[in-house]
Image (cartoon, rainbow, N blue to C red):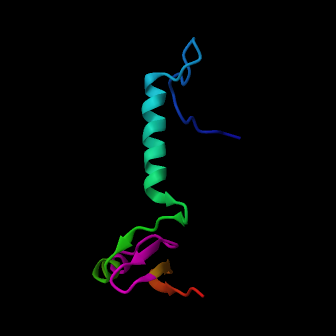
Amino acid sequence: MNIQEFVSSKIVDENGYLTQEAQIIFNQLFTQLQINFSDEGLVVPPQSAENIAQLELADAENGTLLYDETNDLMKVNIAGVFKTVLTS
């Protein structure tokens, strides 16, 4: 099994502290996680209805999940067309 390297430099120095490079990487990683996740779960990127239509035409990746802020609906790309996600 081939496991990709996450970091190609040292993560911990000789004293057991994070190196500056590792601090930068982890800071960026956790910042992005905090932006995209909340206590409620994954924060879905909002899109207006017009932008969702453009993504349909641009053949967005299958399974892409978006929040349609214009209509207050969740939508998922299924075979090139965004369908409304029904919630109970």
Q: Position of residue 35 (x, y in %)?
A: 43, 55
- Total marks drawn? 0
- 79 and 82: which one is in front? 82
Residue under the point 48% across and 22% down: 19
Residue 69 sits inside the magenta stretch? yes
Residue under the point 60% across and 88% down: 88
Residue reaching furthest to the top: 14
Q: Is residue 51 left or right of residue 2?
A: left
Residue 30 sits inside the magenta stretch? no
Segment colored magenta: 55-73
- 66 and 16: which one is in front? 16
- 52 and 72: which one is in front? 72
Q: Position of residue 37 (x, y in %)?
A: 50, 58
Residue reaching furthest to the left: 50
Residue under the point 56% across and 21% down: 12
Residue under the point 28% across and 82% down: 50
In the rendered image, the vertical position of residue 58 relative to residue 28, given as above or below: below
Q: Is residue 11 left or right of residue 25?
A: right
- Where's the N terminus, which quadrant? top right
Residue reaching furthest to the front: 39
Q: Position of residue 39 (x, y in %)?
A: 55, 61
Q: Quadrant of residue 16?
A: top right
